[in-house]
């Protein structure tokens, strides 16, 4: 029985002490087990690297991320200086800039950093949900991958930009972004209308037109898609934000940032509308191959990064929900001692761990292919190699669409653990992570676009990768009767035209495809979890 006490002594300090002293890597024994399982011989060195690195995102960067996520600290755009000159200055809080210097100072995209180290450090960074830095981190990785694939034929200035982003100059690392979206279509890159006009020397181009949704518009460089004058094919270009000597003078390279967007989430991230008016641009890769370049390099990196972000959000939210359950007492006993709570948190932990194992398993396959995918469907290799590459392409898209959906549900359920405190952004980071997860679902192809893309890809490979063999290869641990049922259902869906004719039958098949895609990938993750043990 509780008696009145006008000086209520209750505090959350016990919970906060445990939560705030948690080291993202050192104190997460399951994460260590997953890293050890998938990284093999690299584990002993990588383990020490992560032990040394983890305190930075776990403590200092975490605290800074909480500060720069406050509404008053949103990025601001100043169009003119005091003398009427157009400068389009992006103003960001110092907390963001400190995190950015620390993250990019790690040299994540350097040849000195292994791919396993890159993934694992990014996973720890993403636990803070600080998209003002992590979005630029992802876009810079895509820029490095795209330019690196064509560096031999790149303009000398583009090569210098690549080195600046990859290895840094005297400890200063360049930051990148990617501007693809136009008002007439987000994922519909072939519908782009921004024009690239050749300069007289044939090595430079000038860009004209507007990009409608440009995230990380504060960065040093951007990959931009455009169509060369007179061509209907998309090309890719590398565009500096400032030409040499002009950054300190705040003279942008032939473009204007007309406004910043107000978004549901990722509020630390400046996302703007950019109007090009003669921006100097360097072509990357063959002209007219822009869609293949974007899909084969940029989107692969970005889709993986979304999955890393989702996985990291799950890990943090479920961990903190369990800590709160073990602390909070209601009606005379701890939350964790109620069977429904105990069962729910165990299921959330299982789902979170499965997502983590699936991420590392897929990333290991990507490393086996040299760290990148080739554009388009493989056709010119032996059957086993073609099938392996197709499975990886398929898994990366399935992972993106499935983990975004799962993460929204997991974070929602974690919020409910905290009851009224769960919706208070001053109490925990989970509401912010949920808003960001909703944004993540729209990046690099929303769910329905990915379902359509995968469905089309499956139809195009039926002659050399039948659905029954594909399902057996994707889910070797499934019971044969389950494999057969999934293969039969998938076969019916693949053979149907889901692009037109919204009659009862096609709608039913399309909805079945939505559920089946989620089921197949969730089972893939469950097998990865069982593999770790």
Image (cartoon, grey):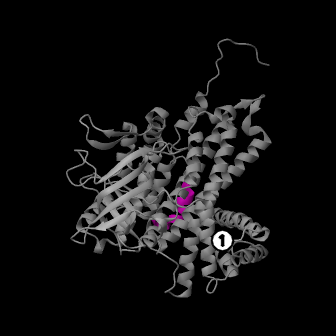
Callout 1 crowding tier (Cα within 10 Å): few <14, some 14–19, many ≥20: few
Q: Is residue 252 left or right of residue 46?
A: left
- Residues 110 and 251: in front is 251
Residue 197 in view here: yes
Is 306 situated left or right of 238 in this image? right
Q: Write down the region rendered in magenta.
A: 31-42
Q: Position of residue 43 (x, y in %)?
A: 47, 62
- Give the overall secondary structure of the magenta segment: helix
Q: Is residue 184 magenta?
A: no
Q: Quadrant of residue 387?
A: bottom right
Question: Which one is in front, 479 or 390?
Answer: 390
> Farthest residue in the front direction?
230
Say which quadrant the N terminus sits in: top right
Relative image position of residue 444 (x, y in whole percent): 52, 60
Q: Check if residue 33 falls in the magenta segment.
A: yes
Q: Does residue 257 appear to the left or right of 445 in the view shown?
A: left
Q: Which image quarter: residue 533?
A: bottom right
Residue 327 vertical position relative to residue 111 in the rendered view, above or below: above
The residue lying at 66 percent from left, 33 percent from top is 327
User: Does any portion of residue 371 appear in the rendered image?
Assistant: no
Residue that numbered label 1 is attached to: 499
Looking at the rendered structure, the secondary structure element under dot 1 is loop
Q: Position of residue 193 (x, y in %)?
A: 43, 64
Name the one closer to the observer, 205 or 490: 205
Counting from the top left corner in percent of width and height, residue 465 is at: 63, 83
Q: Is residue 206 above or below residue 384?
A: above
Left or right, 305 with respect to 226, comes to right
> Between 72 and 480, which is closer to the camera in this rendering?
72
Residue visible at 78% across and 43% down in the picture: 340
Residue at 58% across, 55% down: 441
């Amino acid at each position: 029985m509780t008696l009145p006490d006008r000086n209520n002594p209750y505090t959350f300090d016990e919970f906060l002490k445990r939560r705030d002293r948690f080291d993202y890597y050192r104190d997460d024994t399951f994460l260590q087990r997953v890293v050890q399982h998938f990284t093999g011989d690299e584990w002993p060195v990588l383990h020490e690297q992560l032990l040394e690195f983890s305190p930075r995102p776990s403590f200092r960067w975490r605290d800074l991320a909480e500060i720069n996520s406050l509404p008053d600290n949103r990025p601001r755009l100043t169009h003119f200086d005091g003398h009427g000159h157009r400068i389009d200055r992006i103003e960001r809080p110092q907390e963001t800039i400190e995190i950015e210097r620390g993250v990019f100072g790690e040299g994540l995209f350097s040849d000195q950093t292994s791919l396993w180290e890159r993934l694992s450090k990014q996973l720890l960074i993403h636990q803070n949900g600080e998209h003002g830095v992590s979005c630029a981190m992802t876009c810079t990785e895509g820029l490095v991958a795209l330019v690196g694939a064509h560096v031999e034929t790149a303009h000398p200035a583009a090569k210098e930009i690549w080195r600046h982003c990859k290895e840094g100059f005297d400890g200063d690392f360049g930051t990148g972004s990617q501007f693809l979206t136009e008002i007439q279509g987000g994922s519909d890159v072939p519908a782009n209308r921004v024009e690239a006009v050749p300069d007289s020397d044939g090595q430079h181009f000038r860009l004209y037109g507007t990009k409608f949704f440009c995230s990380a518009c504060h960065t040093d460089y951007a990959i931009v898609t455009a169509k060369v004058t007179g061509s209907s094919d998309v090309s890719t270009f590398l565009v500096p934000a400032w030409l040499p000597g002009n950054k300190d003078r705040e003279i942008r390279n032939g473009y204007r940032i007309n406004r910043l967007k107000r978004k549901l989430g990722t509020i630390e991230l400046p996302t703007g509308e950019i109007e090009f008016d003669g921006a100097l641009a360097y072509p990357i890769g063959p002209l007219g191959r822009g869609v293949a370049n974007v899909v084969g390099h940029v989107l692969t990196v970005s889709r993986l990064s979304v999955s890393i972000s989702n996985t990291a959000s799950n890990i943090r939210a479920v961990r903190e929900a369990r800590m709160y359950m073990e602390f909070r007492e209601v009606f005379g006993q701890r939350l964790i001692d109620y069977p429904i709570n105990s069962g729910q948190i165990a299921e959330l932990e299982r789902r979170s761990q499965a997502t983590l194992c699936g991420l590392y398993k897929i990333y290991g396959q990507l490393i086996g292919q040299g760290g990148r995918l080739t554009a388009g469907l493989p056709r010119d290799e032996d059957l086993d190699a073609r099938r392996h590459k197709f499975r990886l392409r398929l898994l990366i898209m399935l992972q993106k669409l499935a983990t975004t959906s799962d993460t929204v549900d997991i974070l929602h359920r974690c919020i409910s653990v905290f009851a009224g405190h769960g919706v208070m952004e001053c109490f925990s980071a989970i509401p912010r992570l949920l808003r960001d997860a909703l944004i993540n679902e729209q990046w690099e192809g929303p769910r329905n676009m990915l379902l359509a893309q995968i469905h089309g890809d499956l139809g195009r490979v039926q002659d050399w990768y039948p659905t029954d063999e594909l399902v057996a290869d994707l889910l070797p641990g499934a019971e044969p009767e389950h494999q057969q049922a999934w293969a039969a259902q998938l076969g019916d869906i693949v053979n149907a035209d889901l692009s037109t004719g919204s009659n009862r039958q096609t709608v039913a098949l399309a909805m079945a495809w939505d559920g089946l895609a989620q089921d197949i990938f969730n089972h893939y993750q469950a097998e990865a979890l069982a593999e770790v043990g």
